[in-house]
Image (tube, helix red, strand yellow):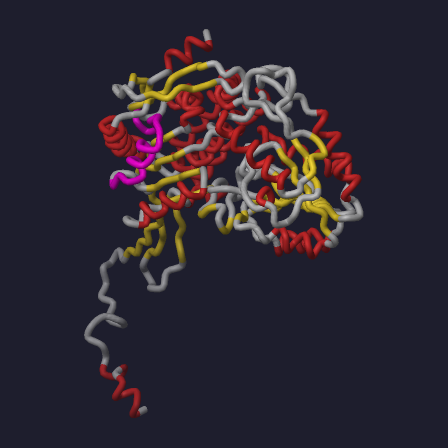
Amino acid sequence: MSFQHEFDRLSGTLFVDGQYVKSKSTEQFSVIDPATEDRIAEIANASENEVDDVIDIANSARKAWLAFDPRTRSTMLHEVAARIRRDKAIYGYFMTREEGKPFKESVDETSWCATAIDYYAELGRHDAGRVAGTTVPGQLHYSIKEPLGTVVIILPFNFPLVLMCWELAAALAAGNSVIVKPHEQTSITTLKFMEVFTDLPKGLVQVVTGGPRVAQQLVRSRKTHCIAYTGTVPIAQEIMKVCAESFKPVLIEASGNDPFIVMPSAPLDIAARAGAFAAYLNCGQVCTSAERFYVHQDIHDEFVERLVIEAKKLRIGNGLDAVDIGPMATSRQRDRFEALLSRARSEGARFATGGNRPTGLNHGWFIEPSVLTNVSPDSEILNGESFGPVAPICKIANFEEALVLANRSDFGLGATLYSRDMREIMRAVNEIEAGMVWVNTPVLDNDALPFGGRKMSGVGRQLGPEGLAQFQSSKWVMIDPEAKSQDFWWFPYPEAETYKTTKQL
């Protein structure tokens, strides 16, 4: 298979009703390889009629999916996971070409898709409802779980497959159909990945590419029934406003500004390696990146020295080569990030290392990983999502100050603590205002546990039973097989229970 031939074949296509079709839209976006700046594909900005057709097909396909019994649906999802594992290197290649991350990270991400689908294949089969003890003898009282309908998944560029599969797997396991609107930068990866779903009912999983207009149409349609969005806060707020008009359920993962606390009891060699991984993974373009380092004053200088060593070890280059860090995904992302670093410098931050464009890489949107010291708790870089390879370090006097600063953010996605003091560990777990807390093991996920945040980081949860519940509606059922009269509480009410009679007693 020629990879460039595949980019050409998929350019301008949508995945509709189980097959690739060329969009009739004349509007297109170019896809640029972030490591070479070469144009590698074009994606269509789907027309309004095409989007409407996809929605109608999705609503019909859901009926075919529900016609299968839960065990059969589970088996079919396991087969999808097996296909993903078989061809993970292929999808990893497309991801690296479009998004820039090292090939190993792309293949790992593809593997995580398979584990999520396997997990929900079993959970969806099991979690169909529950029976409760009856309040009336002879009756049956229970609840059942039903799908919401057609789920729309709107994706960012940084994890184009696994973020989709976390939600898609849960939505399918719950019995829904799915429409995916990928990010413009990584649409070809998403389209190529649709091969794994071709044995499912046609139209059950579809992809429409395009820009904001396409997303808005999917969100506003009265024929879509749930919106799952990962991206920026302003767009998330607009989606929630639109969905509020019809009480359409939403799942939002907006932004993160995660703290990374290092205390004197921590093993500094491990903490420094962990800090480098948490700050620089995927060139810092991770919602759960460590973006605020709070380091105790007694170990501050040594930690900075060790982190600088780790940062300088990292190999930067094309993700298809033997590297640790690839480019940023788009030129706009790098421009935004460089401007943020410039403002940090003007606010007094000192660059212990990095922050420049690496020499010898004349093409591509590369940037050196940086370590910043003398960073004020009030600085811009500590109070917003930086989304780039930077580790800004703030010196703290004690653990109490670390907790206060950790909770000062408008965001509450994740938090990391490096400490061997159980009192500090338990206080962090109980007092940090975040949806996830990592102690001595950063940026790790588990399919069986909920992923999500508090405050401005979003609403709802991905993964775990909670992730399945996002795409289900509960229905309460009561059955009296004998259709007996319920005289103990039906009309007419007995005279003995009137206010007048009770008052006399």
User: Is residue 40 among the parts visible in the rendering?
Assistant: yes
Residue 258 position, x and y percent, is 59, 44
Q: Residue at x 62, y 40 (%)?
A: 346
Q: Is residue 505 above or below residue 221?
A: below
Magenta segment includes 478: no
- Could you say where residue 80 lies in the image, as x and y percent from the top left? 44, 24
Q: Position of residue 155 (x, y in %)?
A: 42, 33
The C terminus appears in which quarter of the rendering?
bottom left
Please name the residue shown 58% across and 17% down the image: 318
Q: Which residue occupies the extreme left position in the image?
A: 492
**Residue lying farthest to the bottom in this orientation:** 504
Q: Is residue 339 left or right of residue 182?
A: right
How many labels sit on residues? 0
Left or right? Give the position of 407 relative to 298: left
Along the viewing direction, whichever of 441 and 78 lies nearer the viewer: 441
Identify which residue is drawn at 43% across, 19% down. 31
Q: Is residue 234 left or right of residue 363?
A: left
Q: Is residue 1 above or below residue 476?
A: above
What is the magenta range? 202-222
Q: Is residue 86 visible?
A: no
Q: Residue furthest front?
A: 346
Tell me where residue 149 sits by quadrant. top left
Taking 356 as reference, is 170 above or below it? below
Q: Is residue 186 left or right of residue 348?
A: left
* Residue 442, position as x, y percentages in the image: 64, 39
